[in-house]
Amino acid sequence: MPELPEVESLRRYLIREGLVGRTFEQIDLEDKPSPKSGTGAISGTKNTVGRQVRSLERRGKQIAAVLDKGVLGFHMGMTGQIHVLEPDEPAPRFTRALFTMSGGFRLVLADPRRWAKIQHFESPDHAFAGLGPDALDPKFTSEQFACLLDGRKAQIKPLLLNQAIIAGVGNIYADEALHRVEISPAKRTNEIASEKLGTLFLAIRVSLEHALEFILNHPDDRGRPYIVDAYDARMQLHRKAGSFCPRCEIPLVTMKLGGRTAYYCASCQK
């Protein structure tokens, strides 16, 4: 699933391609009906026709196209991809929505599993409702992070995946950060010292920033970012069977926490 670095790279790509300042002229949706709510919803897009994109904002894994009236929110789900089409380029397979904009600019959402969401909101606050502070927000400090987790008895990894606490940390980067500071994903949060939580916060930042830099420097053959591969060099911890701990070189082990698979080193992560 795309996480903060992948989504931030998408935001920067859309800005670079010239989305900001364009006006929505026509929206074509797939023939299959979309659910009215929940995963895969596409709703309210007719409200964007005639509206101009003023800015592109992100919190966590979500993007908000701020319009001259209202906001169009995007959540990529597990397999959603947004691309700018070349002139006369046909819409790709699995297209769910095609946006035709001023100047012949065309934007497409392709999603083979139909889990991505596009929804219209009144404001960025509505679009990002329920999300905690963004993990890369420069105003969000390690002290605030430790305070949010202080006294909680839940295991640390599920808390890191709780987007209402900190927005943008997903499965692979939670494992990466926990490995960097030698904390077991199953450790109870109230058993971790505040100073160690501060160190974990910095490890989250380092992991996300390193991944973002890798993605920006490794676009596809069309210059587009947003590559999702847990085995490439954005990760120190390779999440596949037979992988070894990069620190002590013993095989990684796995466990299920909150329905997600955690990869970790049983020797150096306590």
Image (cartoon, rainbow, N blue to C red):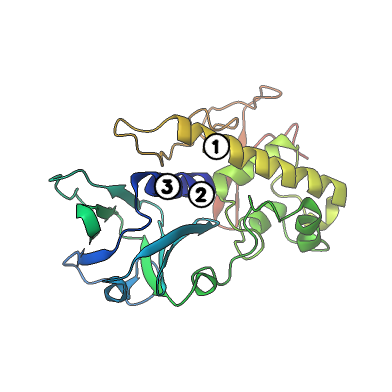
**Looking at the rendering, which quadrant does residue 258 occupy?**
bottom right
Contact (CB < 8 A) between labels 1 and 2? yes
Contact (CB < 8 A) between labels 3 and 1? no
**Looking at the rendering, which quadrant does residue 164 occupy?**
bottom right
Tag 2: residue type? Glu
Camera sees residue 254? no
Residue at the spot of label 1: 211
Label 3 element class: helix
The numbered mark, 3 or 1, whose residue comes first in the sequence reads 3
Q: Is residue 157 left or right of residue 172?
A: right
Residue at the spot of label 3: 10
**Mark 3 or mark 1: which is in front?**
3
Give the residue drawn at x 38%, y 49%.
14
**Looking at the rendering, which quadrant does residue 28 occupy?**
bottom left
Tag 3: residue type? Leu
Label 1 element class: helix
Q: CA distance from mark 3 to mark 2?
A: 11 Å
Give the residue drawn at x 73%, y 43%.
202
